[in-house]
Amino acid sequence: MTTTKDGRPVELARDDERRRFTATVEGTVAALAEFMQTPELVVFTHTETDPTFEGQGVASALVRWALDDVRARGYAVLPVCPFVSGWISRHPEEYGDLLYRSKTETVHD
């Protein structure tokens, strides 16, 4: 189970209808990560943390959980959101393989 730094339980969920992952603490949405999905990848567009939960590790736990979910579903990731992009760059051994790479090649003269 994931907890905040002060020990409160964090409930992590995927909300396909609203196209976001959420981290809820004591009934409050503490953090969310919005996404768009295509047939081959998940684009993370925005991450937001409630100011009262900043520094508690909630957004990091949410991103880790969301990336694990994306991996389990067999998708690649395109992190447009700076927080998600930075998080992946700090954990390349675990999540670098999820980064989307175009299947087309550009031909130069």
Image (cartoon, grey):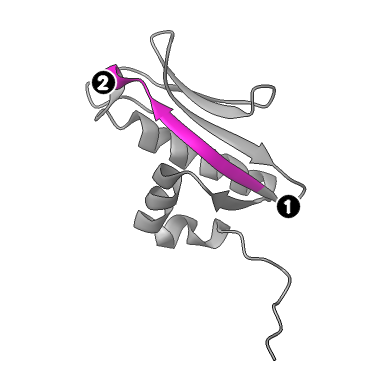
Residue 23 within the magenta-colored segment of the rendering: no
Q: Position of residue 70 (x, y in %)?
A: 61, 44
Residue 39 versus residue 10 in the image, above or below: below
Read off the residue under disc 1: 40
Main secondary structure found in the magenta portion = strand
The segment highlighted magenta reads: 42-52
CA–CA distance in space, label 1 to label 2:
37 Å
> Looking at the image, which residue is at 45% across and 39% down?
63
Residue 7 in which image quadrant? top left
Residue 30 in which image quadrant? top left
Q: Say whether residue 53 is left or right of residue 72.
A: left
Q: Is residue 31 visible?
A: yes
Read off the residue under disc 2: 7
The N terminus, quarter of image: top left
Residue 49 within the magenta-colored segment of the rendering: yes
Find numbered disc 1 in the image and state the secondary structure of the residue it sits on.
loop
Return the mark for residue 15. none
Amino acid bearing label 2: Gly
> Looking at the image, which residue is at 71% across and 84% down?
107
Q: Position of residue 98 (x, y in %)?
A: 56, 57
Q: Say whether residue 39 is left or right of residue 3.
A: right
User: Local crowd at mark 2 within 10 Å, few (<14), some, or many (≥20)?
Assistant: few
Amino acid bearing label 1: Glu
The C terminus, quarter of image: bottom right
